Amino acid sequence: MATLLATLTLLNPAPMVLDMPPRQPIPLHVMTVKAAARERAADDVREWRAEQRRLARERAERRAREAAERAAAEAAQAHAVHYGSGAEQWRGLALEVGWSEAELPTLLRIIRAESGADWSAWSVRP
């Protein structure tokens, strides 16, 4: 074994140590490319966040608009009073404008006789 080591030492006079080559500094153009890539990535993130904010604003505006439309529809339904069918549909209106409860049967009988309780009826006589 010693002979083998002596022979190898004679054939290769350099010491048998694994020396790592010194670490080379990163060239400037590589740093510039990396910095540019980081900037592009940061720009992409900023654009994405701005887009997310825009979408959130649009969603909030749409929800507010829909809520306002729903509120308007509910308010319109609250004011649309349905009094029933036939002459009975006019009972509530008659009470609102001042007819007494005692006069309502007579009024409703006249409504039935005159127009059949059709709100769109009109007289052809002048």
Image (cartoon, rainbow, N blue to C red):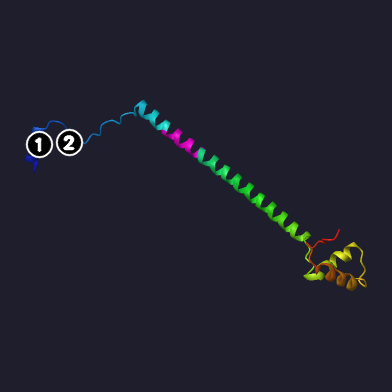
Tell me what residue is drawn at x 93 percent, y 69 percent. 100
Q: Residue 85, position in %: x, y?
A: 77, 70
Q: Residue 36, position in %: x, y?
A: 42, 31
- The residue that disc 1 covers is 8
Q: Is residue 116 magenta?
A: no
User: Is residue 48 or residue 65 the one in the foreground?
Assistant: 65
Q: Residues within 10 Å of mark 1 (few under 14, many from 20)?
A: few
Specify the principal SS of the magenta part: helix
Q: Secondary structure at mark 1?
A: helix
Q: Which residues are magenta?
A: 37-46
In the displayed structure image, the side of residue 118 where residue 18 appears, left or right? left
Tell me whether the residue at label 2 lies in contact with that at label 1, contact meaning CB atoms closer than 8 angstroms: yes
Q: Quadrant of the C terminus?
A: bottom right
Q: Residue furthest top?
A: 28
User: Is residue 106 or residue 11 the one in the foreground?
Assistant: 106
Q: Residue 10, position in %: x, y?
A: 8, 32
Q: Quadrant of the N terminus?
A: top left
Q: Residues within 10 Å of mark 2 (few under 14, many from 20)?
A: few
Q: Quadrant of residue 95?
A: bottom right
User: Is residue 61 or residue 111 the one in the foreground?
Assistant: 111
Point out which mark residue 16 bears.
Answer: 2
Q: Is residue 38 magenta?
A: yes
